[in-house]
Image: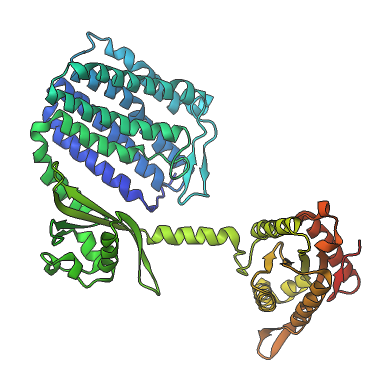
Amino acid sequence: MQFQFRYTSGLWLFMVSAMIILVLLIFSWRYRRSSSGRCFIILMVCAFLWVSNFILETASLTLAWKIFFARIEFIGITFIPAMWFFLVREFTNRRILGDNWLVVLVIPVVTNVIIWSNPLHHWFMGTPFIISDTPFPVVDFDYQWWFYAIHAPYGYLLIGCALMLLLRSIPSMNGVYRMQSCYLLVAIILPAITDVLYVMGISPVQHYNFTTAVFSISGSILFYSLFHFQFLDLLPLARDSIINNLYDGMIILDHKDRIVEINPSAKGYLALEDSAIGKEFMQVNNEMIKKVQVLMKENVEKGDIKIGKQAPTYFDVRVNTITKKSGTHIGRVIAFRDITERVELFNQVQALAVQDSLTGIFNRRSFMEFSKREIYRVLRNTGYAVSLVMIDLDNFKAINDQYGHRLGDKALVTFTTTIQKQLREFDIFGRVGGEEFAILLADTDARTAIQITERLRTAVEALRIQTGKNREVSITASFGVVSSLQLRKKDIEINNMLDLADQALYEAKQKGRNQVVLVEL
């Protein structure tokens, strides 16, 4: 089975998370001889196993590979709660004696056996499937009873025990260890809350777990808590290995808003040189920076910025103020990332959701939705009327058969363009079938609707579609019309009006096509 993958927007966040966890793992290796050090190392191994395979799962294009990497993820996921529990026990000097610690690992071991043998019994996953109506393909794993009744509750039970143990120990600790305990408490709670929200179905992207990204923050807090005397040694490595290689652009300002550093990504995005370092941020002549300056003047910490007009680039910008514990302002960090791909994808999805892909007018679903709103106005306002027109191109199959679908598509586009030019801005025009179209004429009675529709029929009849050199084909259409004024109030409903207009359309075809017929009731 060939492995195919594709980078998706936002995956950089998890890559950075994996790098942070890997740096923490490497740095903590020196503490492998201590019990707490070993617990921390194993915890980081589990976390790295989770986030690295989560990246591969997200990038994979096939369901089989996504499930494979998810199974590897669960090797780390199932043991993380136990590692939290062991770490807290070590930290609070309440160690598990003898081989009793093995009892805690029974459920994680059994869970992994069940996951890898899942095709035989489907206790953990039912029938996973890829969800395509998200910004990028994600998997609904269809979790079954073992996940909800055993795996998740057991993991939360271990984390809950660790939190209770920690909270009970804090009052008896002195100032230094009490502060470390608070850090440890935050480190446990952050990913736990994120994971609980995911299990409950609450996530920025449906069925997508952001816990792995949060875990890198927890790991950093935990490292500081456990190995505070070596924490400053971590900063240069973290900076060189992560910040300078971030996909995000980053500009660092001092307390006078002078540029003191620009990372390589920022230089690339903004076309800035090292000569910009030392200059006042407000004096740099750059379109992007000028828009960031507006955010700073308005004390806005986050915003989206559009650069360029012909082929615009979009950035997500964050302005973070850095202060000392005393509250003294010492600088700012301006971070920004290119979200053009995400914005364009959103715009495309939004357009596809309401437009017919060929003609650019409303698709059937959007036509129905907007028409329902207009009909609601009819029901609320006495004297307000709408008319619905059903249109079918005459003998359109013959055009496709004789000249091909390419010319048929050209005829459809020409037809819709012609109709649109004759309509008002507030009329609703949609494609409801192959060569079937519908128009909801707002604030229009039956008599006016017939006049408008007859004008549309004449315009279509006058059309000529070029089929080649000095060759052309004409098209005509049949029209069926119904007005809300013809109906009792209880019968004024979009589906009923479509059916009635369709009856009138059928009558127009029976009478010889290229006609307008008002339904008779």
> Could you say which is closer to the camera, residue 389 or residue 1?
389
Q: Is residue 375 visible?
A: yes
In this rendering, position of residue 394 left or right of residue 199 = right
Residue 435 location, quadrant: bottom right
How far across and how far down the image is residue 134, in percent? 49, 49
Which of 372/137 is in front? Answer: 372
356 vs 400, left or right, is: left
Say above or below: 23 vs 456: above
Q: Residue at x 79, y 72 (%)?
A: 449
Q: Quarter of the image containing the N terminus?
A: top left
Q: Position of residue 261 (x, y in %)?
A: 14, 59
Place of residue 350 in the rendered image (x, y in percent of width and height, measured from the top left): 53, 59
In this view, the residue farthest toward the front is 382
Q: Residue at x 30, y 22 (%)?
A: 163
Quarter placement of the C terminus: bottom right
Along the horizontal axis of the image, is 25 left or right of 490? left
Q: Which residue sits at x=60%, y=68%?
A: 360
Depth order, front residue of 453/446: 446
- Which is nearer the eye, 3 or 389? 389
Q: Is residue 73 above or below residue 482?
A: above
Q: Which corner quadrant of the image does residue 188 belong to?
A: top left
In the picture provided, is 494 more to the left or to the right than 83?
right
311 vs 217: above or below? below
Rendered location of residue 215, percent (x, y): 29, 36
Query: For the view shown, which residue lies furthest in the top direction?
Result: 98
Query: In this figure, which colouring scheme has been used for the structure?
Result: rainbow
Q: Is residue 91 above or below residue 239?
A: above
